[in-house]
Image (cartoon, helix red, strand yellow):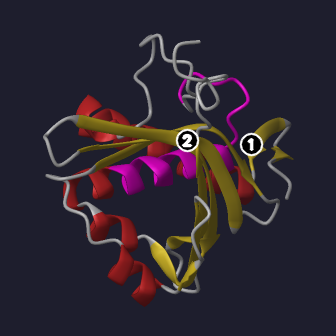
Amino acid sequence: MKLERLEGGRKVAGKGGRVILGLALGVMMTWAAAGAESWGQLPLPDSGSSAPNPLTEPTATPGKTLLYSLESQFGRAVAQRGGAGFASWFADDGVILGNGKPPVVGRVAIEKSATWSPANYQLSWTPDGAWMNGAGDSGYTWGHYDGQSKDANGNPVIVSGRYFTVWGKQAGGSWKVELEASANEPPEAGSCCKLPGR
């Protein structure tokens, strides 16, 4: 794709360049217009967060920016609607692989398994990075997640780990999660094997 051409002795953006530039500007303007609360898990500039931010990351391509935007929208749906919001982002043939459990295959099965309410369980995540293929129709994100709930006595329970999400552009142009895989963080070094009194 040629991004610029000469016209009358001056460089102008070609059609491909306008499309890419328009996509990137549209995503950024949407974030800015919606306000900080709509950013989901993406950090605000100068927030001190180490998570990537497409507005300040010098290597953020339009594809990465799009994937970060999808992650943010996905995160907002989960924060607002819990398991129903989570399941709504999966492709019809989407797959979940998690924490030594059997795979959950297909959006219908994912809907049946993701039944938590945001009042009982809060799932949040922050991408550490993203990659988009050259065709711009498939990519992946990865990062860190936290799940917060309470035990039977009302004590907080926090589970954290790493995740990997594969995104695919669907026939109608929408983006859906094709694969989501996660694994809990291992116990702190030495905490699993200590003998009492040692």
Give how far across and how far down residue 107 sits, in percent: 45, 84
Residue 182 locus on image (x, y percent): 59, 54
Is residue 10 rendered magenta in the image? no
Tag in front: 1 or 2 = 2
The crowding category of the residue bearing disc 1, from other C-alpha atoms within 10 Å (few below 14, some 14 to 19, many at least 20), is some
**Image x and y of residue 84, in percent:** 28, 71
* Residue 134 vertical position relative to residue 10 in the rendered view, above or below: below
Front-most of 148 and 164? 148
Identify which residue, 11 or 87, lies in the foreground: 87
Q: CA distance from mark 1 to mark 2?
A: 46 Å
User: x, y percentage for residue 193?
Assistant: 64, 30
Q: Residue 111 is drawn in which quadrant?
A: bottom left
- Residue drawn at 19 percent across, 35 percent down: 155
Q: Give the magenta part as a residue range.
A: 55-75
Which of the pair 2/126 is nearer the observer?
126
Q: Provide the residue designation for mark 1.
A: 12
Type of secondary structure dominating the magenta stretch: helix
193 to the left or right of 89: right
Mark 1–mark 2 contact, CB under 8 Å? no
User: Is residue 60 located in the magenta-colored stretch of the structure?
Assistant: yes
Which image quadrant: the C terminus? top right
Q: Residue at x 79, y 66 (%)?
A: 135
Residue at position x 62%, y 37% in the image: 186
Identity, as a three-letter code, of the amino acid under mark 2: Gly
Q: Amino acid at mark 1?
A: Val
The residue at which mark 2 appears reads as 161
Relative to 196, is 13 on the left or the right?
A: right
